[in-house]
Image (cartoon, grey):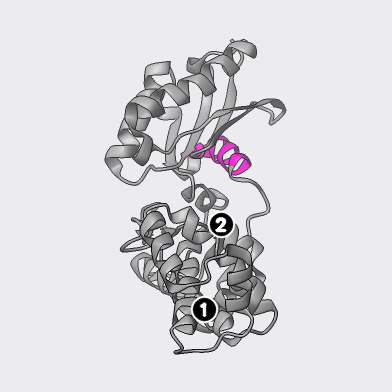
């Protein structure tokens, strides 16, 4: 039976699998419905993993036992118990434990080099991971959007709502951000904003979508929108600083990931400036490959990263 490597990137919406042979030649890429382990639970996640992996292996005439390295980068793997349960699903399929690696999907970029590395993620939520010289993973933030997720799209969107509410209360002026918000959303009274927050506070993507308005207003020079970006950059820097302190190392690689840091150049440059000033010598960049390809590379390098 042919030997191969496998990388998985399983998010809440889609799951992706990529296979290559031992020489690195691509065998196939596959997509199926995804899941988030911490919200969908073990029963549903187990089924989604199986429905992604087993039909793909059958199509390629491959078996789990002939896999030389598999990296599962999965949403919602937030604790050692989550990791162990997820590992059990793949061992049940027939993958050998010594060739199996399970990580949080945001964590996978830490394995791009042998060196210690950090990754800070700012999308709908936020989190920072660090991998020290001994291979130990350190995490800061990302627990939920009520007590955490600082510097995220949710955080920025909530700050937009607060700024607009303050102007409608006659407390501040935001000449670009507020008219843009009112025109875009139709939430033109404090009562409507209050109702919207009450209805959507637990649906963080519905708050995070207002971060785009902050970006548009900041590009036009709105001082309040720029200040919102500065506050979020400060918060993300705090995640990086505290994770680096746990690692007891300053000189390392820092990857920036998530929709805000990738697409919002104002926030990205503010974060990069703070890192350069406080952690001189650190290399800061956006990953040049996808999480799926990073997982496949991690599977191929598994002999030295675990």
Determine if the magenta segment contains residue 293.
yes
Where does the N terminus fall, quadrant-wise?
Answer: top right
Front residue of 21 and 288? 288
The residue drawn where x is 49% and y is 55% is 206
Quick check: 13 left or right of 44? right
Q: Is residue 51 visible?
A: yes
Total number of numbered discs in the rendering: 2
The answer, for residue 97, to whether it is visible in the render is no
Q: Which region shows up in magenta?
A: 292-303
Q: CA distance from mark 1 to mark 2?
A: 18 Å
Instruction: Report x, y in % for residue 125.
Output: 45, 58
Q: On the image, which quarter does residue 215 sit in?
A: bottom right
Q: Is residue 259 above or below residue 180?
A: above
Q: Is residue 239 above or below residue 231?
A: above
Disc number placed over residue 258 in the picture, else none: 2
SS for dot 1: helix
Q: Quadrant of the C terminus?
A: top left
Q: In the rendered view, would you say 45 is above or below 194?
A: above
Residue at the far left in the pictured view: 81
Q: For the residue carrying disc 2, how many other residues have a C-alpha within 10 Å: few (<14), some (14-19), or many (20+)?
A: many
Closer to the camera in the image, 293 or 251: 293
Q: Position of residue 83 (x, y in %)?
A: 34, 38
For the point 50% across and 77% down, the residue is: 164
Q: Is residue 222 magenta?
A: no
Q: Specify few, some or many for label 1: CA neighbours under 10 Å numbering under 14, 14-19, or 20 or more.
A: many
- Checking the image for residue 228, the label placed there is 1
Which quarter of the picture shows residue 259?
bottom right
Question: Quadrant of residue 95 in the image?
Answer: top left
User: Residue drawn 47% across and 71% down?
Assistant: 161
Helix or strand or loop: what does disc 2 sit on? loop
Residue in view at x 37 percent, y 18 percent: 92
Residue 302, percent from left and from top: 50, 38
């Amino acid at each position: 039976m042919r030997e191969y490597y496998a990388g998985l990137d399983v998010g809440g919406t889609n799951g992706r699998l990529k296979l290559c042979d031992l020489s690195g030649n691509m065998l196939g890429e596959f997509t199926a419905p995804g899941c988030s382990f911490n919200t969908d639970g073990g029963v549903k996640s187990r089924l989604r993993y199986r429905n992604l992996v087993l039909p793909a292996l059958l199509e390629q005439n491959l078996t789990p036992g002939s896999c030389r390295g598999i990296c599962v980068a999965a949403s919602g793997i937030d604790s050692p118990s989550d990791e162990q349960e997820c590992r059990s699903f793949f061992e049940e399929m027939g993958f050998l434990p010594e060739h199996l690696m399970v990580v949080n999907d945001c964590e996978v970029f830490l394995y791009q080099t042998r060196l210690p590395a950090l990754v800070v993620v700012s999308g709908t939520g936020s989190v920072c991971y660090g991998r020290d010289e001994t291979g130990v993973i350190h995490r800061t933030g990302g627990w939920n959007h009520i007590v955490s997720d600082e510097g995220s799209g949710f955080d920025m969107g909530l700050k937009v709502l607060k700024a607009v509410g303050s102007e409608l209360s006659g407390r501040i002026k935001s000449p670009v951000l507020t008219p843009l918000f009112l025109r875009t959303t139709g939430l033109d009274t404090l009562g409507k904003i209050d109702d919207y927050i009450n209805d959507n506070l637990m649906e963080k993507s519905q708050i995070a979508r207002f971060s785009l308005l902050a970006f548009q207003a900041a590009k036009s020079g709105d001082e309040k929108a720029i200040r919102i970006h500065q506050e979020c950059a400060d918060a993300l820097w705090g995640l990086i600083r505290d994770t680096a302190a746990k690692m007891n190392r300053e000189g390392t690689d820092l990857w920036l990931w998530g929709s805000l840091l990738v697409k919002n150049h104002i926030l990205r440059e503010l974060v990069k400036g703070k890192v350069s000033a406080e952690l001189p010598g650190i290399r800061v960049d956006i990953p040049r490959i996808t999480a799926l390809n990073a997982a496949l590379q991690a599977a191929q390098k598994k002999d030295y990263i675990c």
